Image: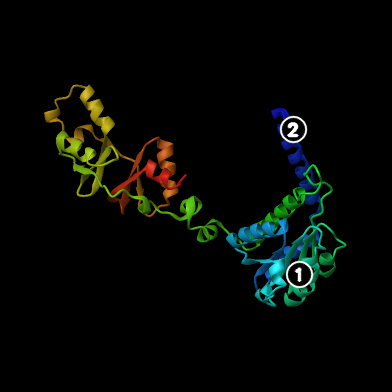
Amino acid sequence: MERANIISIAKSTLEIEISELEKLKNRIDDQFAKAVEIIHSAKGKLIVVGIGKSAHVGNKIVATLNSTGTPSQFLHASEAIHGDLGVIQKQDVVLCISNSGNSPEITNLVPFLKEYSSALIGMTGNKNSKLAEFSEIILDTHVDLEACPNKLAPTSSTTIQMALGDALAICLMELNNFKENDFAKFHPGGSLGKNLTARVEQFLSSQKPQVSEDAPVRDVIISISASSHGITVVTNKDKIIGVITDGDLRRMLMKGEDVAKVLAKDIMSLNPKTIEKNILAREAMKILKENNIGQLVVTENGKYFGIIDLHKLLDEGII
């Protein structure tokens, strides 16, 4: 197959799914709003039920809801009719996902889903199905065309289900007034969590290079060389006076200065960029990027506390 044909097929796939998403958008109505209200007002959790490809979609919807403030649990339809129905409590709401709404597992299950829960919401592409018949609310996810060339593999239909799940989650986030700090509570790991919660002090170097303002160049060189940062901080009783980088040393030598007479205060750069240790690490990264520098002096109540390095933050996924 020619590369041009591959590109054409990919674009056609996306065009079909975009078209179906546009139709879904135009079908959002009071039924959807009622579903959001029922889930939001539930005294229990949301149980999402599915089988086949809808089960995969259901798992994703549950993951999104849990991470955005709506307690949810996935229940596989085939497991439910073999004992797992016990997970549903009367205060829970059930969202059952099935494109046909008539698969054997679903038709056997829906009477029990309705009986055991406070409300049954059906997400289906068939409004005349058994699932639709038993559902208090029907979320219509029918598609006119699957993107699959044989019109068989769930493609457009699962995209529609996934998108509608996202719409539910975002509406519930707004109703719950779920903000960035709330989001951070559920994402403590990985780069996402670190960017939302990690503080500067978590990424401090174990090295704390510093010299006095009257230190000779020899001491400055030793201090810079003893750390991996290419910088030392000039202090007076932990008060920051300035900084000296290996670049400052090179520039001094190029001027032909009498090295024996040069002191730290003669070559230091005044007013270095600093940040308090309890500030979010992403703020440190912002300062580093904006000023095109590799290190930032960290302070505690205005006094020298340590060094934070650009490469360390990058390695930890801080952006």
* Residue 72 falls in image quadrant: bottom right
| Quadrant (top left, top right, bottom left, bottom right) of the N terminus | top right
Residue 101 picture location, percent across and down: 81, 62
Query: Which residue in the structure is indicated by mark 1?
Result: 120
Residue found 28% across the figure and 37% down from its top: 230
Rendered residue at 20%/40% (across/down): 223
Quickly name the residue at label 2.
8
Which color scheme is applied? rainbow
**Disc 1 packing (10 Å; few <14; some 14–19; many ≥20):** many
Q: Is residue 28 left or right of residue 180?
A: right
Q: Amino acid at mark 1?
A: Leu
Q: Look at label 2 and name its amino acid.
A: Ser
Question: How far across and how far down the image is residue 108, in percent?
Answer: 79, 71
Marks 2 and 1 sit apart, C-alpha to C-alpha, by 41 Å
Query: What residue do we see at 32% from left, 48% from top?
Result: 298
Helix, strand or loop status at disc 1: strand
Left or right of 40, for residue 274: left
Considering only vertical position in the picture, is 218 above or below 167?
Answer: above
Q: Position of residue 242 (x, y in %)?
A: 26, 40
Residue 180 sits above or below residue 226 on the image:
below
First along the sequence among labels 2 and 1? 2
Q: Is residue 267 above or below residue 136?
A: above
Question: Do we see residue 196 in this rendering?
Answer: no
The mark total stands at: 2
Q: Is residue 36 visible from the viewing direction of this image?
A: yes
Q: Residue furthest right?
A: 128
